[in-house]
């Protein structure tokens, strides 16, 4: 048997360090066994998937040195490797289950489902929705079908009992069937859900080991059942511990930058970031902290993964990166890496249109554009003094902006401007005054190039990190004040 592993990101946002972490362990496992590593794009959620996100994922995984043997950009024997291009296939598989009686067409409307949930709640029922809850009399099914009403395909799921999942790291895991919904396999628009597409593709792509985040454990019973219904062998499952913030909560962009693009912009070396990801829950047999990818692969053993939640700590990463910079780079390589990092034409071409109208000589450039090459800025509370805004207003603007931008999915200049203008109007502030604390947070001074352009170039994670840093410097609101602000913000954005 040839070992085949895969990473299957959904292209719905910035490339996440968690994706790189999972990719690294899949690649290490494949290489250790002389097998293949596949990259598959799971873009069945067509409203959230974007081409830019897919490109950024491919670019950043490649930047880290994670190369795949098969994928949407390199092809391979089992393609296409983008689920949107495999759409028709999933429908046939779903219909096969319907014909065989292990799945059914469900014509329930959204309102009916809401009612069902409400009435079950009222009855104190805490089990999942099953076929028996959803079934309609045959005549009603036929009527709805004849009327062309939309339907989904759902899988049948046992009403009760225990499902045992074998996990390579955890051994047998018992999950209660009572908590598993009659999962939708095919949506009313004909697109498959993650569960169907994932199982069909893992089978057709001959995946032997599924190494993924532990947040997927609860999906495993559905997958096991689908393999059974189709009569296919199930790959071995391995659920990796989730990355955590230093406070042990699940790594999230609200607390910690999660985008690989942020770590790139901060000037971490890809080798060091990959090294650090290799330290997440795993260690070299000799416990050494600094190692490169090939050293990791040569000593790899998945059983050395420990299940205690690995903490992704920027300070620790910086320390390791420092070792790499000092010990691994010659002067020439340092210069080369600096150029690649930020003194490259692509980055400079984004910045130059903003600064060219404002400089008289090249020596004006560094003071004006230095913040494009920085991490957190050396600002102080005094920098936020403004004749029309008191410190409470400054806090409010920064805090509202953080909340608002946390939800922002499109990160282009015009959208950002429209969003911030909307917020300023809601707060009854002139956009000029509103933007003042943002200028200080992002550029270190209000005498700067357009802050909205700067935010779009720096990207969401760097922007958020600087805004949060600014909020700390300007004086983060107390817990009580935050509660009040939250209320105000909710009223504003309602
Ligand atoms: N598309 C899923 C994700 O975004 C893949 C999960 C899996 O590996 O099964 O993480």
Image: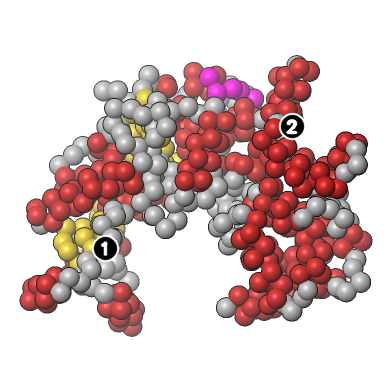
Q: Quadrant of the N terminus?
A: top left
Mark 2 vs mark 1, CA separation in Å: 49 Å
Give the quarter of the image for residue 429: bottom right
- Quadrant location of residue 323? top right
State yes or no: residue 293 in magenta: yes
Residue at the image position 13 percent from the left and 56 percent from the top: 98
* x 59%, y 22%: residue: 292
Q: Is residue 336 magenta?
A: no
Judged by depth in the image, the label closer to the viewer, 2 or 1, is 2
Above/below status of 433 relative to 41 = below
Residue 85 coordinates in the image, percent (x, y)? 31, 43
**Position of residue 406 measured from the top left corner of the image (x, y, whole percent):** 61, 60
User: Circle 1 is placed at which residue position?
Assistant: 188
Can residue 397 be seen in this snapshot? yes
Residue 138 is left or right of residue 109, and the answer is left
Helix, strand or loop for the magenta stretch, by majority: loop
Looking at the picture, how far across and down is residue 15, in whole percent? 54, 44
Which is more toward the observer, 280 or 393? 393
* 131 to 49, vertically: above or below: below
Tell whether 370 sits left or right of 193: right
Query: Looking at this view, is 233 or 42 the one in front?
Result: 42
Q: Which residue is mark 2?
A: 343
Tags 2 and 1 in contact by the CB under 8 Å rule? Answer: no
Q: Secondary structure at mark 2?
A: loop
Badge 2: few (under 14), some or many (20 or more) residues near its Cα, within 10 Å? some
- Given residues 178 and 462, the one toward you in this image is 462
Residue at image location 58% in from the left, 53% down from the top = 252
Whether residue 123 appears in this view of the structure is no
Which contiguous range is marked in magenta?
289-294
Left or right side of 211 for 147: left
Density class for disc 1 (Cα within 10 Å; few <14, some 14-19, many ≥20) is: some
């Amino acid at each position: 048997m040839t070992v085949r592993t895969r990473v299957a990101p959904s292209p719905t946002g910035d490339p996440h360090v968690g994706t790189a972490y999972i990719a690294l362990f899949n690649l290490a496992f494949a290489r250790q066994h002389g097998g293949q590593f596949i990259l598959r794009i799971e873009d069945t959620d067509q409203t959230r998937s974007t081409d830019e996100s897919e490109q950024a994922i491919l670019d950043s995984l490649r930047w880290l040195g994670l190369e795949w043997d098969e994928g949407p950009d390199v092809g391979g024997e089992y393609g296409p490797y983008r689920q949107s291009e495999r759409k028709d296939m999933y429908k046939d598989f779903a219909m096969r289950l319907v014909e065989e009686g292990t799945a059914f067409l469900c014509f329930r409307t959204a309102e009916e489902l809401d009612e069902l949930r409400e009435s079950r709640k009222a009855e104190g029922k805490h089990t999942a929705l099953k076929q028996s809850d959803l079934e309609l009399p045959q005549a009603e099914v036929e009527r709805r079908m004849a009327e062309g009403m939309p339907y989904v395909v759902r899988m049948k799921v046992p009403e009760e009992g225990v499902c045992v999942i074998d996990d390579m790291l955890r051994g047998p895991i018992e999950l209660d069937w009572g908590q598993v919904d009659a999962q939708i396999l095919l949506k009313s628009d004909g697109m498959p859900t993650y569960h169907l597409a994932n199982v069909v593709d893992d089978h057709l792509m001959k995946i032997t080991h599924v190494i993924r985040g532990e947040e997927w454990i609860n999906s495993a019973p559905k997958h096991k059942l689908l393999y059974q219904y189709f009569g296919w062998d199930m790959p071995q499952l391995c659920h990796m511990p989730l990355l955590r913030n230093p406070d042990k909560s699940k790594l999230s962009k609200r607390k910690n930058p999660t985008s690989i693009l942020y770590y790139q912009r901060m000037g971490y070396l890809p080798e060091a970031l990959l090294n650090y990801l290799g330290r997440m829950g795993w260690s070299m047999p000799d416990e050494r902290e600094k190692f490169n990818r090939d050293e990791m692969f040569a000593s790899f053993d998945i059983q050395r993964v420990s299940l205690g939640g690995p903490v992704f700590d920027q300070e620790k990463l910086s320390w390791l990166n420092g070792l790499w910079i000092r010990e691994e780079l010659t002067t020439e390589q340092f210069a080369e890496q600096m150029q690649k990092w930020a003194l490259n034409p692509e980055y400079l071409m984004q910045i130059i249109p903003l600064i060219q109208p404002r400089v008289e000589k090249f020596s004006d450039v560094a003071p004006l554009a230095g913040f494009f090459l920085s991490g957190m800025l050396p600002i102080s509370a005094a920098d936020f003094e403004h004749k029309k805004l008191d410190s409470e207003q400054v806090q409010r603007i920064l805090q509202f902006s953080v909340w608002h931008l946390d939800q922002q999915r499109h990160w282009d200049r015009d959208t950002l401007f429209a969003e911030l203008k909307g917020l300023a109007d809601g707060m009854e502030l002139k956009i000029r005054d509103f933007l003042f604390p943002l200028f200080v947070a992002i550029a270190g001074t209000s005498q700067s190039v357009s802050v909205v352009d700067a935010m779009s170039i720096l990207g969401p994670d760097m922007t958020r990190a600087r805004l949060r840093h600014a909020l700390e410097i300007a004086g983060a609101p107390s817990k009580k004040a935050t509660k009040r602000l939250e209320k105000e913000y909710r009223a504003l954005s309602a």
